[in-house]
Amino acid sequence: MSALAHYLEDEGLATTIVSLVRLHSETIKPPRTLWVPFELGRPIGGPDDKTTQRRVLESALGLLECDAGPPLLVDDDTKNAGTDPDPTWRNPLTIQPRTIDATDVGGTLTHLLDELAEVEPVYRRRLDATGRTTFGVVGIDIRGVLTYLMSFLADAPDASPHPDMSPNLAMRFAADDLKAFYLEASTAGDGNPSSWQLGTWFWRETAAAKLLIALRAKTMQSDSKSLARIGTVFLVPRIWADELGL
Amino acid sequence: MVALNTLSDQLAKVLTDLDCPTFETAPWVRGGPLSERRVAIVSSAGVHLRTDRHFHGSDSGYRAIPNDAAPNDIVMTHTSPNYDRTAFIQDLNTVLPLDRLAELAEDGVIGSVASHHYSFMGATDPRAMEGGARELSGRLKDDAVDTVLLVPV
């Protein structure tokens, strides 16, 4: 990102950058930098925190009125970093605990569809309220996503459901769609849960996460280098793979 | 530094060991008052219209996002799974602050907002983005943009 600032400024456009990794900005030295202490993934501040978001934009854009550079301004409001849990948050979803036996493909799919019946109404309620979903990258509905992922667990991958994605890539994005569907549902209630609170619920309590963990173990052993890499890197975030001892 | 203790050791090491480019020149563009500037956002979050091409691998290209795109039309296909996406799924402004930028224009803090914003995918070697960035500068100038707010993820 800091290098992009250099290229665009070199083409005659004034730039200012919000930086999440101070070390990178100090090395590359873009013309104007606002460093923020937020968690990776939320460079402008937390969800619906309009005050912080506006302050970040005004601070970053304000650097354009400096006469010389490269200025690096530090926003040290760590209380908005996004990592503190919200003790008042209650997950609007109550789902039954389910054990997945990855060798029982039919039984696993039944468990997943049972869980989906608990999650989907809350997802729909949130979608109706907000008008926005990030689900749908692969272009198939949530049952299609589950069925497609299960076909990899069964060693009989279905054809790619997306015309511009290979089967393996579609599997990776289907996993992202599954996570998005569940996490959106889990944010349908009140409160401001941290990413760790939401992740703890998803990765420790849902059958959907157990599917992704089983799929990771399965694909990591694949003879296909592409599939093995997707399994190793993309299905379970590194920090959760470590946390769960995978 | 970002809260590295919230990251896996592996990701923290990737960030601290990243081979960052350095430059012999330090371009510096002077501009008019902020209240007269036309501002575009350039993101590296791998966000794009639902109907546009997904990002993949070491894709060094960019995607255009109309300023009037509905939040529901914007998805994320960044390669890395190792950063928080729960903020993005709750509020597009945490990554692509279109509402906040519009408010700054309404309040006269900035002059106007570009007709389009753009996203790269930040897992790519930044040196590979140079061609795309220089091409993008032409599109921005065609839109009378003089100022770019760069936002990582």
Image: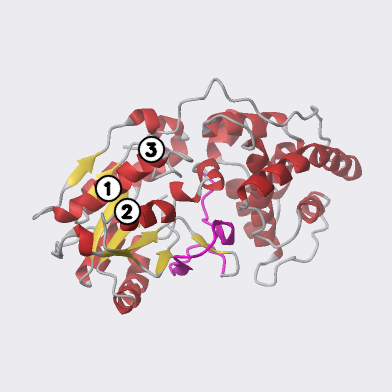
Which residue is label 3 attached to?
A38
Labelled disc at residue B104? 2
- Neighbor class of circle 3 (other Cα within 10 Å; few <14, some 14-19, many 20+) is many
Q: Chain of mark 2?
A: B
Magenta span: chief secondary structure: loop
Q: Chain of mark 1?
A: A
Residue A245 picture quarter: top right
Instruction: Pinpoint residue A141: horizontal percent, then vertical percent.
Output: 76, 56
Inspect the image, locate mark 1, and give the three-letter code of the amino acid beneath it: Glu
> Do labels 1 and 3 touch, CB within 8 Å?
no
Where does the magenta region start and end? B53-82
Q: Residue furthest left?
A: A67
Instruction: Pinpoint residue A123: horizontal percent, then vertical percent.
Output: 71, 43
Q: Is residue A20 visible?
A: no
Inspect the image, locate mark 2, and give the three-letter code of the amino acid beneath it: Leu
Q: Residue at x 65, y 54 (%)?
A: A172
Label 3: element kind: loop
> Do labels 1 and 2 touch, CB within 8 Å?
yes
Labelled disc at residue B10? none
Q: Residue furthest top?
A: A87
Instruction: Pinpoint residue A140: horizontal percent, then vertical percent.
Output: 74, 60
